Image (cartoon, rainbow, N blue to C red):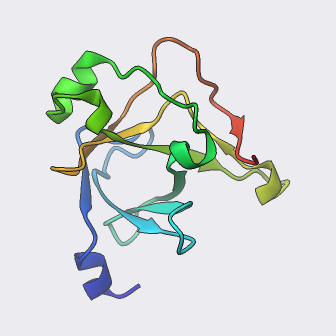
Amino acid sequence: MTLSAVATLPLLSMTEPLPGFPGHRDYVLVTADGDGRLFWLQSMAPDGPRFLAVDPGVYFPDYAPRLPAPVCAGLGLEDPAQARLYCLVTVPAEGPAAATANLRAPLVVDPVTWRATQVVLPDGAHPIRRPLRR
């Protein structure tokens, strides 16, 4: 990807760094497959982390977590339904067929400001490792 291509992508600004990555707050969300089913959450730092992510609605149409009010307020979201959600994906050594999505700790994004945060849902109703295969 060229620098000019990155410049046209929305910059996600994390209100808090992702756990384990304290020096990284600025990311871009880049489609990984061309059809919007898989994304790379790529740090803007040259040596920064990159995570595979999905829009959970594509894989789990029944996924409708209740977002904590402080999270929405911290992002400036008046209505939680406005948020875009992304779930990080783990691809284990067994390969892509065994990939899982973390539905317990989605990234919550304000689509107007592109401010984002990862939230651990307090209710425990959503698994940390839900198989991605439909």
Query: Residue, x 19% and y 35% (percent of image)?
Result: 75
Q: Residue furthest front?
A: 61
Image location of residue 26, percent across then percent down:
27, 56
Query: Residue, x 46% and y 13% (percent of image)?
Result: 122
Above or below, 48 relative to 79: below
Q: Residue furthest top?
A: 123
| Total marks placed | 0
- Location of residue 61 by image quarter: top right
Query: Residue, x 30% and y 77% (percent of image)?
Result: 6
Left or right side of 5 for 96? right
**Closest to the observer, 90 or 103:** 103
Left or right side of 105 for 133? right
Above or below, 10 relative to 124: below
In the picture, which quadrant includes the N terminus? bottom left
Above or below, 29 relative to 101: below
Query: Residue, x 26% and y 86% (percent of image)?
Result: 4
- Location of residue 12 by image quarter: bottom left
Image location of residue 23, percent across then percent down:
31, 50
